[in-house]
Amino acid sequence: MSRADIFANIRRGLRRSEATEAQRETVRQRLQQRPRNIIPSRSQHEHDALVELFVRMAREAAAEVVELDSLEQLPCAVADNLEQKQQHELVLASDSALTELGWAAVHERVECHQRVAQVGDQASLTLAFAGIAETGTLMLFSRPDSPTTLNFLPDTHLVVLSKQAIVGPYEDTWDRLREASPGRLPRTVNMITGPSRSADIEQKLQMGAHGPRQLVIFLIP
Amino acid sequence: MDIKSPEFKQSARIALQDANLQKALGNLKAGFPGKRASAVARMPEFDALRDQARDLKNHILEHLDLYLEAFEARVVENGGQVHWCRTSEDARQTILQICREQNAKTVTKGKSMVTEEINLNEYLEEHGVQPVETDLGEYILQLRGDHPSHIIAPAIHLNLEDVSEAFHEHHHRPKSDDPAVLMAEAREMLRKQFAAADVGITGANFLVAETGSTLIATNEGNGDLTQILPKTHIVVSSIEKVVPTLEDMSLFLRLLARSATGQEFTVYNTLSSGNRRPDDQDGPENFHVVLVDNGRSDMVGTEFQEMLRCIRCSACMNHCPVYGAVGGHSYGWVYPGPMGSVLTPQMIGIEKAALLPNASTFCGKCEEVCPVRIPLPKLMRHWREKEFEKHLSPKAVRWGLGGWAFFATRPGLYRWASAGASRFMRLLGGRKGKIRKLPLAGGWTDHRDMPTPTGKTFMQQWNERQQQEKQR
C-alpha cells in the first residue's frame, strides 16, 4: 500500500496524475545521455600533469605512493615495504597479472595466499581499475578475481595502479566502468582516497579506524 | 528517541551552563568552518557547482516519481528488492521482517540518520535482534545509551574523558587518555562483530537511478565491512536521495565532503548494486533497499519543497551560532541545527516543534554555506507563520503582536505612545543612561543593560529637520 500512497502523494504535490510523455522523455534522455556537469579545471590537463596531480593528491590524503620502473619489480618492492611495517603475510588478488610475477624470489620474506580476506590478515595486494587525479582517488570493483574484503579487512592495503589508468575527473571513470561491466555495474565499486580515519573523538583526526591503517600505491608505467 | 523539542528553552538554558558541553562545542567551532573554508578556496568552481546542484535537485524533484521508478526497476534487475515505507512504523516492521527471515541475532550498522529517525535500534532490541553500531561515534553513543547530537559527528558533545570512561566500563581495560588507543580498542572489539553479524544495515547518501546503485560515503570503512561480510545487506534511505546518473552523483560528491568535513573527498565512496554476482567470492547474497517517506512526499509542491534538496552535509549547523551555543541535543529530536528546525516540524508536527524555527537569529549563515542553496531562514519563517496561523504562539507573543498592531495602525496614537515610552525609559535609566531591569524584557536585561533612548523619536527628529529645511 505504501508504494501507491507515496507515488500518489508525490504526484498530488506536483499537481499532475501520471507524468506526460514529454516529462518521461526528459527523464529517459537524462538517463541515457548522461550529460556531464561542471568539470573542475583542476582535472583537465595533459596526461603527464594528471599523473603528477594524482600522486600529489594521494599523498595529501596520507597514501604512500611508490613509483616502479616495471611490474616485474613489484614482488621485491612489496617485500621491502612490508618489511618496514614488520609484516610478512600477504593475501593476493587472483589476477594473473599479479600471481604470475616472481613471488618465489621473495618467498622467504613474504608468505603469499590467494583467498578472500579474514579478520587478522596483515596485508593484501590488489589491482586498481583506475586512478582519479582530481582527488588522488583509486577505483576498484568486486569481481571473482578480486574480492572486496581484500580492500577493507587487512591492516595494510597494497594497490597496483598503472599510469595509463589515471584519468582527470571522476566522470572519465564512469564511461570506462560501463564498458568494463556492460549491462550492470559490478556488485561493489570502491572509490578509495587514502587510508581509513576518524575524528569522532574530540574532532582529533586518528588514522586507521576500521579499514586499512595504511594504503600503499605502487605506480607502474 | 523521545521527542523533547517542546522543552527547547529549558534544555538550551541547561546546555549553556554545562561546562563540559561548552568545551566540546569549542572543538566543533574551531574545526569545521575553517576546514570548509580552505577546501572551498581550493575549488574555484565551488559556487558554480552549488548553482548547478540546486538546479539539478529542482529538476529531480519535478520528476521524482519517474526517477524513483527507474531506480526501483534497476535494483530489481540487479537482484535486489525495494521496500516502500510511508511511515516509521512501516519501515521498522519491514526491516524486522527481513531480519527474521534471516534468523538474525545480531545486526551491524553503518552510520544512518534515517534509522535514528525511525527509531530502529530500540525496536530491533525489543524484538530480540541486537543492533551493533560500528561508526566510532555511534559506537560510543550506543555504549553510553546516548543519541547523536550532530548528523555527521554524532559524538561531538562528548569529551575524551567521557569516551575513556565508557570504554573502560564496557571493555574492562585500563583507562586511556590517548584517542589513538581508544580507537584501536574499538577497532579490535568491532572486528568480531563485523564477522559474526547476520545482517548489515547501512544508510545511503545517494540512490543512482541509472544503475540501481546506492552510495555511502564514510571515512572509517565501517560501512563497507558492515555490507560485505554479512549474508544480507539492508540499505535504509529516504525517497529524496535519488539522483539520475553517476555523472550527477559526481556533482554532489564534489560538494558533500568539502561542505561537511572540509575534505577534498571522503575516504571511501562505495557503490552497491544488488547482490553478489555468481562467481564472486564475497559480498552479500541478499540486497534490500528500504525507502522511507515519513512525511517527505507531503513536502512536494509546498513552500517546504526546497528542503528536499538537502544532502545532509551539516554545514548549516557547523556555522550556526545557536547550534554552536546550545548543541544538538537541545533541539530535542534527531535532526538539529537549521536543517532540523525546518525538517523536525514536518516530521513530528509543528505543535511539538514550534520553538525550533524560532531558535534562530536569522543571521543567514546557514543559507550562505548550504551546498544546494536551501533558503533555510525563509523556510523557518514559513514555519513561524504556520505556528501563528494555528494559534500555537505563546500568549505573550500573540498579545504583544496584537497590541503592537493596534498602535501601528493608528499612527497618531503610535507617535504619542512611543514618545511617552521613550521619556519613561529615560526616567528609568537615570543619569547612567542604562536600564538594569525592564518589565517584560527580562530576556534582555537579565544578561545585559538596556541603553536608554538618548533623544527624541524618529518622527520628532524628522519633523524638526523638515522645519529647518524650510527655514533655510
Image (cartoon, rainbow, N blue to C red):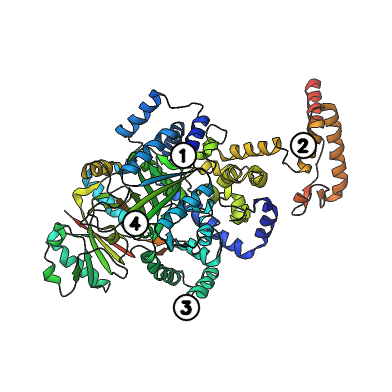
Three-letter residue code for mark 4: Glu
Q: Is residue B367 left or right of residue B233?
A: right
* Rendering coords of residue A64 (x, y %): 28, 61
Q: Nearer the observer, disc 4 or disc 3?
A: 3
**Residue found at the very far bottom of the displayed protein:** B174
Chain holding disc 1? A
Q: Is residue A109 above or below residue B399?
A: below
In the picture, the disc for residue A3 is: 1
Which mark is first along the chain, 4 or 1?
A: 1
Structural distance between the alpha carbons of marks 4 and 3: 35 Å
1 or 2: mark nearer the eye = 1
Sequence-first disc among 2 and 3: 3
Location of residue B410 by image quarter: top right
Say what amino acid the circle numbered 1 marks.
Answer: Arg
Q: Which residue is mark 3?
A: B173
Name the quadrant of the C terminus of chain B.
top right
Disc 4 sits on a residue from what chain? A
- Local packing at callout 1 (Cα closer than 10 Å; few below 14, some 14-19, many 20+) is some
Is residue A21 rendered to the left or right of residue B469? left
| Secondary structure of the residue carrying numbered label 1 | helix
- Measure the C-alpha gap from mark 2 to mark 3: 60 Å
Callout in the foreground (1, 3): 1
* In this picture, residue A126 sits left or right of residue B301: left
Question: Which mark identifies residue A60?
Answer: 4
Same chain under badges 4 and 3? The reply is: no
Q: Which mark is residue B401?
A: 2
**Nearer the viewer's eye, disc 2 or disc 3?**
3
The one of A44 and A119 positioned closer to us in this rendering: A119
Q: Secondary structure at mark 3?
A: loop
